[in-house]
Image (cartoon, rainbow, N blue to C red):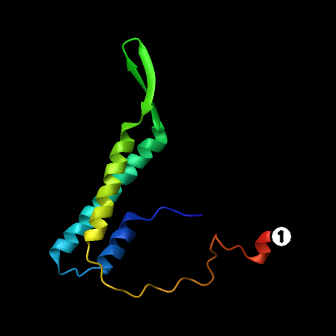
Amino acid sequence: MSRAVKITDLEKQLLLRIDTRDLIEVDKVKRYVALVKQTRKLQTEINKNGVLTKTVNGSQEFMKANPAIKDLNSLTKTLISLEKSIKFEMINPPDLDKDKKDNDEPEVSDLY
């Protein structure tokens, strides 16, 4: 089961992948992290209130798309653009824990 990535862990990993002496790149990472926080807040609101909201206009009541969805889509596009502009350096990713089970590939014991 997938858990949300901690913001602090995300920021640490991003900072490890850039030249931290380049203040422009550090600023991009900080902005990226701030946008991720905003995205998560919007997603929480959408989850809580639903993708449709009831609108009352005088005697009329109707359902319309939650306006937070438009904001979420806009933030997502901004995140993608910002991510593409960050100058990531090549790193050697850490070896994955061999004992940790991957949900995509069940073991024989999982089938019985």
- Image point 31% across, 67% down: which residue? 83
Whether 76 is drawn above or below 46: the answer is below
Could you tell me residue 36's position as x and y percent?
A: 34, 58
Q: Quadrant of residue 105?
A: bottom right
Residue 102: x and y in percent read: 62, 74
Residue at the location (51% across, 86% down)? 95
Quarter of the figure with residue 91: bottom left
Q: Which amino acid is tagged 1?
A: Tyr
Give the quadrant of the N terminus: bottom right
Q: Residues within 10 Å of mark 1 (few under 14, many from 20)?
A: few
* Number of marks drawn: 1
Q: Foreground residue, 70 or 54?
A: 70
Q: Is residue 62 left or right of residue 31?
A: right
The residue depicted at 25 percent of the width and 66 percent of the height is: 30
In the rendered view, does 28 fall on the left or right side of 40?
left
Element type at marker 1?
Answer: loop
Give the residue at mark 1: 112
Tell me which residue sits at (61%, 78%) in the image. 100
Name the quarter where the C terminus is drawn. bottom right
